[in-house]
Amino acid sequence: MSLKRRSEKAHENTKRHGFIRFLAFAAIIVSVVFVGYTVISDNIQIRSNNQKIEELSEQTAAMKAKNEQINGYLENDENLEEYIEDIARDKLDYANADERIYYVIPAGN
């Protein structure tokens, strides 16, 4: 083999190795970007889920308190009448026959 052919072959090998290095480097960069994006998006999702958990825990505590109140009313008939009266006053805006209901309207600013 002549020296010229060897140098051409060496040059082709160098090109081929350079291209392979470029592809490997590009694959590493793409992998790093993908992993970084995945980690960041997962952290955002975790924060969002933690906020939902806190909201649901607060709602659960409020419902438990309301259930305890209702169970207290339902323990005997006297409390049941009080519960019905509270519901009628608060939810339905009812009043006894001898009562007057006044609505306070704030002054316009």
Image (cartoon, rainbow, N blue to C red):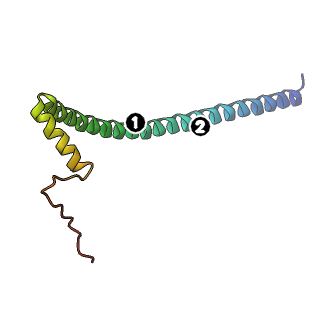
Q: Residue at x 65, y 31 (%)?
A: 24
Q: Are marks 2 and 1 in contact (CB under 8 Å)?
A: no
In the structure shown, which secondary structural element does the residue marked by tag 2 occupy? helix
In the structure shown, which secondary structural element does the residue marked by tag 1 occupy? helix
Which label sits in the foreground, 2 or 1? Answer: 1
Provide residue 81's location: percent of width, then percent of height.
Answer: 14, 37
Q: Residues within 10 Å of mark 2 (few under 14, many from 20)?
A: few
Q: CA distance from mark 2 to mark 1?
A: 26 Å
Provide residue 29's location: percent of width, then percent of height.
Answer: 59, 37
Tell me which amino acid carries mark 1.
Answer: Ile
- Residue under numbered circle 2: 29
Q: Nearer the viewer, residue 105 or 56?
A: 105
Provide residue 92's location: percent of width, then percent of height.
Answer: 27, 49
Q: Is residue 24 left or right of residue 87?
A: right
Tell me which amino acid carries mark 2.
Answer: Ile
Which callout, 2 or 1, points at the residue further toward the start of the chain?
2
Q: Nearer the viewer, residue 76 or 30?
A: 76
Q: Is residue 49 left or right of residue 68?
A: right
Q: Nearer the viewer, residue 41 or 83?
A: 83
Q: Quadrant of the N terminus?
A: top right
- Residue under numbered circle 1: 46
Q: Residue at x 44, y 38 (%)?
A: 45
